[in-house]
Protein backbone atom coordinates (compact mmCIF):
# COMPACT_ATOMS: atom_id res chain seq x y z
CA UNK A 1 0.00 0.00 0.00
CA UNK A 2 1.28 3.45 -0.85
CA UNK A 3 0.83 5.10 2.55
CA UNK A 4 1.22 8.64 1.25
CA UNK A 5 -1.51 8.45 -1.40
CA UNK A 6 -3.72 11.51 -1.36
CA UNK A 7 -1.76 13.30 1.36
CA UNK A 8 1.23 15.57 1.60
CA UNK A 9 4.58 13.81 1.93
CA UNK A 10 6.20 13.96 5.35
CA UNK A 11 8.78 16.73 5.58
CA UNK A 12 12.09 16.80 7.36
CA UNK A 13 12.26 18.85 10.55
CA UNK A 14 14.27 22.03 10.11
CA UNK A 15 16.13 23.89 12.85
CA UNK A 16 15.12 27.46 13.54
CA UNK A 17 17.46 30.40 13.87
CA UNK A 18 18.53 29.25 17.35
CA UNK A 19 19.13 25.67 16.22
CA UNK A 20 15.95 24.22 17.73
CA UNK A 21 14.02 21.60 15.80
CA UNK A 22 10.53 22.46 14.65
CA UNK A 23 9.33 18.99 15.72
CA UNK A 24 6.99 18.91 18.69
CA UNK A 25 6.18 22.62 18.43
CA UNK A 26 2.59 21.95 17.57
CA UNK A 27 1.60 23.19 21.02
CA UNK A 28 3.15 26.57 20.22
CA UNK A 29 0.94 26.89 17.15
CA UNK A 30 -2.18 26.41 19.24
CA UNK A 31 -2.70 29.91 20.59
CA UNK A 32 -5.82 30.48 22.75
CA UNK A 33 -7.50 32.28 19.85
CA UNK A 34 -6.75 29.40 17.48
CA UNK A 35 -7.98 26.79 19.99
CA UNK A 36 -11.20 28.75 20.43
CA UNK A 37 -11.70 28.85 16.66
CA UNK A 38 -11.07 25.11 16.36
CA UNK A 39 -13.54 24.29 19.14
CA UNK A 40 -16.12 26.51 17.48
CA UNK A 41 -15.54 24.74 14.19
CA UNK A 42 -15.77 21.33 15.86
CA UNK A 43 -19.18 22.18 17.26
CA UNK A 44 -20.42 23.00 13.75
CA UNK A 45 -18.62 20.29 11.78
CA UNK A 46 -20.38 17.43 10.07
CA UNK A 47 -20.76 14.52 12.47
CA UNK A 48 -19.19 11.34 11.15
CA UNK A 49 -19.44 7.78 12.45
CA UNK A 50 -16.32 5.75 13.20
CA UNK A 51 -16.91 3.79 9.99
CA UNK A 52 -17.09 6.98 7.92
CA UNK A 53 -13.95 8.40 9.52
CA UNK A 54 -11.91 5.25 8.84
CA UNK A 55 -13.12 5.08 5.25
CA UNK A 56 -12.38 8.79 4.73
CA UNK A 57 -8.82 8.25 5.93
CA UNK A 58 -8.42 5.36 3.50
CA UNK A 59 -9.83 7.07 0.40
CA UNK A 60 -7.41 8.76 -1.98
CA UNK A 61 -8.45 12.40 -2.18
CA UNK A 62 -8.46 12.87 -5.96
CA UNK A 63 -9.00 9.30 -7.13
CA UNK A 64 -11.86 8.59 -4.73
CA UNK A 65 -11.13 4.94 -3.94
CA UNK A 66 -9.12 2.96 -1.39
CA UNK A 67 -5.86 1.24 -2.20
CA UNK A 68 -6.34 -1.99 -4.14
CA UNK A 69 -3.67 -3.55 -1.91
CA UNK A 70 -5.50 -2.85 1.34
CA UNK A 71 -7.11 -6.11 2.43
CA UNK A 72 -7.60 -5.02 6.06
CA UNK A 73 -10.11 -2.20 5.76
CA UNK A 74 -13.07 -4.53 5.24
CA UNK A 75 -12.75 -6.22 8.63
CA UNK A 76 -11.68 -2.92 10.18
CA UNK A 77 -14.96 -1.32 9.19
CA UNK A 78 -16.88 -4.19 10.81
CA UNK A 79 -14.90 -3.61 13.99
CA UNK A 80 -15.98 0.03 13.79
CA UNK A 81 -19.61 -1.06 13.61
CA UNK A 82 -19.34 -3.17 16.77
CA UNK A 83 -17.61 -0.41 18.70
CA UNK A 84 -20.11 2.18 17.46
CA UNK A 85 -22.93 -0.03 18.75
CA UNK A 86 -21.07 -0.44 22.05
CA UNK A 87 -20.47 3.29 22.47
CA UNK A 88 -24.12 4.01 21.68
CA UNK A 89 -25.24 1.55 24.37
CA UNK A 90 -26.86 -0.99 22.04
CA UNK A 91 -24.61 -4.00 22.78
CA UNK A 92 -22.29 -5.15 25.54
CA UNK A 93 -20.26 -8.19 26.55
CA UNK A 94 -21.81 -10.87 28.72
CA UNK A 95 -20.62 -10.92 32.32
CA UNK A 96 -17.21 -12.49 32.89
CA UNK A 97 -18.66 -14.86 35.50
CA UNK A 98 -16.94 -16.68 38.34
CA UNK A 99 -14.33 -18.18 36.03
CA UNK A 100 -13.40 -14.75 34.68
CA UNK A 101 -13.66 -15.60 31.00
CA UNK A 102 -11.38 -13.56 28.76
CA UNK A 103 -12.49 -10.90 26.31
CA UNK A 104 -12.22 -13.16 23.28
CA UNK A 105 -14.46 -15.88 24.73
CA UNK A 106 -17.23 -13.63 26.08
CA UNK A 107 -20.30 -13.19 23.89
CA UNK A 108 -21.86 -10.01 22.50
CA UNK A 109 -25.33 -9.52 23.95
CA UNK A 110 -28.09 -7.04 23.24
CA UNK A 111 -28.33 -4.12 25.66
CA UNK A 112 -30.93 -2.04 23.82
CA UNK A 113 -32.80 -2.75 20.60
CA UNK A 114 -33.65 0.92 20.02
CA UNK A 115 -32.71 1.77 16.40
CA UNK A 116 -29.74 4.11 15.94
CA UNK A 117 -31.04 5.73 12.76
CA UNK A 118 -27.99 4.50 10.83
CA UNK A 119 -28.87 1.77 8.30
CA UNK A 120 -25.63 -0.22 8.67
CA UNK A 121 -25.65 -0.08 12.45
CA UNK A 122 -29.31 -1.09 12.61
CA UNK A 123 -28.73 -3.98 10.20
CA UNK A 124 -25.91 -5.30 12.39
CA UNK A 125 -28.00 -4.72 15.52
CA UNK A 126 -30.84 -6.77 14.01
CA UNK A 127 -28.47 -9.69 13.33
CA UNK A 128 -27.13 -9.60 16.89
CA UNK A 129 -30.64 -9.44 18.33
CA UNK A 130 -31.82 -12.47 16.32
CA UNK A 131 -28.80 -14.68 17.03
CA UNK A 132 -29.20 -17.33 19.71
CA UNK A 133 -26.94 -18.45 21.22
CA UNK A 134 -24.92 -15.21 21.08
CA UNK A 135 -21.51 -15.02 19.41
CA UNK A 136 -18.11 -13.52 20.29
CA UNK A 137 -16.69 -10.26 18.93
CA UNK A 138 -14.24 -12.19 16.75
CA UNK A 139 -17.08 -14.23 15.25
CA UNK A 140 -19.18 -11.14 14.55
CA UNK A 141 -16.30 -9.44 12.72
CA UNK A 142 -16.00 -12.54 10.53
CA UNK A 143 -19.75 -12.90 9.98
CA UNK A 144 -20.34 -9.24 9.14
CA UNK A 145 -17.38 -9.40 6.72
CA UNK A 146 -18.61 -12.61 5.10
CA UNK A 147 -15.33 -14.28 6.02
CA UNK A 148 -16.73 -17.49 7.46
CA UNK A 149 -16.72 -21.13 6.37
CA UNK A 150 -20.15 -21.67 7.89
CA UNK A 151 -22.72 -21.28 5.07
CA UNK A 152 -25.47 -20.74 7.65
CA UNK A 153 -23.73 -17.59 8.84
CA UNK A 154 -23.33 -15.97 5.42
CA UNK A 155 -26.71 -14.29 5.83
CA UNK A 156 -25.10 -12.02 8.43
CA UNK A 157 -22.73 -10.46 5.91
CA UNK A 158 -23.10 -6.70 5.49
CA UNK A 159 -22.71 -6.12 1.77
CA UNK A 160 -21.33 -3.11 -0.12
CA UNK A 161 -20.27 -1.45 3.13
CA UNK A 162 -17.65 0.84 1.56
CA UNK A 163 -20.04 1.99 -1.15
CA UNK A 164 -22.82 2.61 1.35
CA UNK A 165 -20.52 4.58 3.64
CA UNK A 166 -19.23 6.58 0.68
CA UNK A 167 -22.82 7.46 -0.26
CA UNK A 168 -23.39 8.64 3.32
CA UNK A 169 -20.36 10.89 2.97
CA UNK A 170 -21.67 12.17 -0.36
CA UNK A 171 -24.98 13.05 1.33
CA UNK A 172 -23.04 14.89 4.03
CA UNK A 173 -21.17 16.88 1.39
CA UNK A 174 -17.76 15.38 2.20
CA UNK A 175 -17.36 13.38 -1.03
CA UNK A 176 -18.70 13.60 -4.56
CA UNK A 177 -19.48 10.84 -7.09
CA UNK A 178 -17.75 10.21 -10.41
CA UNK A 179 -17.36 7.40 -12.95
CA UNK A 180 -13.84 6.31 -13.92
CA UNK A 181 -12.78 3.95 -16.68
CA UNK A 182 -10.17 1.31 -15.81
CA UNK A 183 -9.61 -0.17 -19.28
CA UNK A 184 -11.73 -3.29 -18.79
CA UNK A 185 -14.42 -1.85 -16.54
CA UNK A 186 -16.03 1.32 -15.24
CA UNK A 187 -15.99 2.05 -11.52
CA UNK A 188 -17.92 4.51 -9.38
CA UNK A 189 -15.47 6.62 -7.38
CA UNK A 190 -15.91 9.18 -4.64
CA UNK A 191 -13.28 11.96 -4.75
CA UNK A 192 -12.98 14.40 -1.86
CA UNK A 193 -15.39 17.31 -2.09
CA UNK A 194 -14.82 19.03 1.29
CA UNK A 195 -11.12 19.15 2.12
CA UNK A 196 -11.78 21.06 5.36
CA UNK A 197 -13.56 18.13 6.99
CA UNK A 198 -10.81 15.65 6.13
CA UNK A 199 -8.08 18.07 7.25
CA UNK A 200 -9.93 18.55 10.51
CA UNK A 201 -10.14 14.78 10.98
CA UNK A 202 -6.42 14.35 10.28
CA UNK A 203 -5.49 17.16 12.67
CA UNK A 204 -7.74 15.74 15.38
CA UNK A 205 -5.89 12.42 15.18
CA UNK A 206 -2.48 14.09 15.10
CA UNK A 207 -3.31 16.27 18.12
CA UNK A 208 -4.51 13.26 20.12
CA UNK A 209 -1.03 11.71 20.04
CA UNK A 210 0.99 14.94 20.05
CA UNK A 211 -0.18 18.21 21.62
CA UNK A 212 -3.15 16.66 23.46
CA UNK A 213 -1.53 13.37 24.45
CA UNK A 214 -2.65 12.33 27.97
CA UNK A 215 -0.50 9.18 28.39
CA UNK A 216 -3.44 7.27 29.87
CA UNK A 217 -5.93 5.37 27.69
CA UNK A 218 -8.58 5.63 30.40
CA UNK A 219 -8.48 9.42 30.15
CA UNK A 220 -8.64 9.43 26.37
CA UNK A 221 -11.91 10.05 24.58
CA UNK A 222 -13.29 6.56 23.88
CA UNK A 223 -14.21 7.40 20.30
CA UNK A 224 -10.75 8.80 19.55
CA UNK A 225 -9.06 5.79 21.16
CA UNK A 226 -11.19 3.51 18.98
CA UNK A 227 -10.50 5.59 15.88
CA UNK A 228 -6.72 5.38 16.35
CA UNK A 229 -6.77 1.64 16.89
CA UNK A 230 -9.22 0.81 14.10
CA UNK A 231 -7.49 3.13 11.64
CA UNK A 232 -4.31 1.18 12.43
CA UNK A 233 -6.12 -2.16 12.09
CA UNK A 234 -7.56 -0.97 8.75
CA UNK A 235 -4.08 0.00 7.52
CA UNK A 236 -5.00 3.68 7.03
CA UNK A 237 -3.59 5.39 10.15
CA UNK A 238 -0.35 6.17 8.34
CA UNK A 239 -2.30 8.51 6.05
CA UNK A 240 -3.07 10.75 9.02
CA UNK A 241 0.60 10.95 10.02
CA UNK A 242 2.09 11.37 6.53
CA UNK A 243 2.11 15.22 6.62
CA UNK A 244 4.10 15.33 9.90
CA UNK A 245 7.79 16.16 10.03
CA UNK A 246 10.07 13.24 10.90
CA UNK A 247 10.39 13.88 14.63
CA UNK A 248 6.65 14.33 15.18
CA UNK A 249 5.97 11.28 13.02
CA UNK A 250 8.27 9.11 15.13
CA UNK A 251 6.75 10.44 18.36
CA UNK A 252 3.20 9.83 17.10
CA UNK A 253 4.00 6.27 16.01
CA UNK A 254 5.77 5.50 19.28
CA UNK A 255 2.69 6.57 21.24
CA UNK A 256 0.44 4.51 18.99
CA UNK A 257 2.68 1.50 19.62
CA UNK A 258 2.31 2.13 23.36
CA UNK A 259 -1.47 1.87 22.92
CA UNK A 260 -1.15 -1.31 20.87
CA UNK A 261 1.06 -2.88 23.55
CA UNK A 262 -1.45 -2.35 26.36
CA UNK A 263 -2.85 -5.31 28.27
CA UNK A 264 -6.41 -5.16 26.92
CA UNK A 265 -7.75 -7.57 29.56
CA UNK A 266 -6.45 -5.31 32.33
CA UNK A 267 -7.76 -2.15 30.70
CA UNK A 268 -11.20 -3.66 30.21
CA UNK A 269 -11.46 -4.32 33.95
CA UNK A 270 -10.91 -0.71 35.00
CA UNK A 271 -13.79 1.55 36.13
CA UNK A 272 -15.93 3.40 33.55
CA UNK A 273 -14.50 1.46 30.63
CA UNK A 274 -16.33 0.01 27.64
CA UNK A 275 -15.53 -3.69 27.32
CA UNK A 276 -16.68 -3.94 23.71
CA UNK A 277 -13.90 -1.54 22.68
CA UNK A 278 -11.19 -3.65 24.28
CA UNK A 279 -12.69 -6.89 22.99
CA UNK A 280 -12.54 -5.56 19.42
CA UNK A 281 -8.93 -4.47 20.00
CA UNK A 282 -8.09 -7.95 21.27
CA UNK A 283 -9.78 -9.59 18.27
CA UNK A 284 -7.64 -7.63 15.82
CA UNK A 285 -4.36 -8.31 17.64
CA UNK A 286 -5.10 -12.03 17.24
CA UNK A 287 -5.89 -11.79 13.53
CA UNK A 288 -3.77 -10.92 10.51
CA UNK A 289 -5.37 -7.48 10.11
Image (tube, helix red, strand yellow):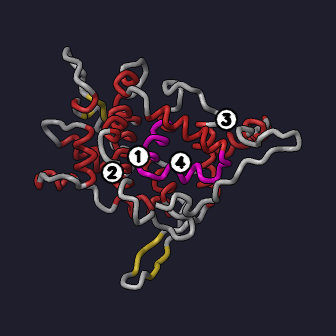
Evaluate if marks 4 and 2 touch, with contact meaning CB atoms under 8 Å apart.
no
Q: Earlier in the sequence, mark 3 or mark 4?
A: 4
The kind of secondary structure element at disc 2 is helix
* Residue stretch in magenta: 225-246
Evaluate if marks 2 and 1 touch, with contact meaning CB atoms under 8 Å apart.
yes
Q: Nearer the viewer, mark 4 or mark 2?
A: 2
Asked whether 151 or 244 is in front, the reply is 244
Tell whether position 249 is magenta.
no
Q: Mark 1 — residue?
A: 233
- Could you give the CA–CA distance between mark 3 and mark 4, rounded to whole angstroms? 23 Å
Q: Earlier in the sequence, mark 3 or mark 1?
A: 3
Q: Mark 2 — residue?
A: 75
Left or right, 134 with reference to 55 = left
Q: How many numbered circles does the render carry?
A: 4
The kind of secondary structure element at disc 1 is helix
Tell whether position 231 is magenta.
yes
The residue at 50%/27% (across/down) is 217
Residue 180 image position (x, y, % from top left): 46, 79
Asked whether 278 or 262 is in front, the reply is 262
Residue 275 image position (x, y, % from top left): 35, 28
Magenta segment, principal secondary structure?
A: helix
Q: Mark 3 — residue?
A: 211
Residue 192 image position (x, y, % from top left): 56, 65
Q: Mark 4 — residue?
A: 47
Amino acid sequence: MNRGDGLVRRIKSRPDAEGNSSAGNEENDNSPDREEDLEDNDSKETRLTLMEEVLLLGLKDKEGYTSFWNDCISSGLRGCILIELGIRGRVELERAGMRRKGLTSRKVVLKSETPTGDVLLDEALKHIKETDPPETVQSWIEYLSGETWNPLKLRYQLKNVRERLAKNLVEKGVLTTEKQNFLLFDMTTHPLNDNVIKCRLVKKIQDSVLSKWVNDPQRMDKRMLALIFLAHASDVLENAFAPLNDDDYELAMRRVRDLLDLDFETESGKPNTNEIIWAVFMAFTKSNC
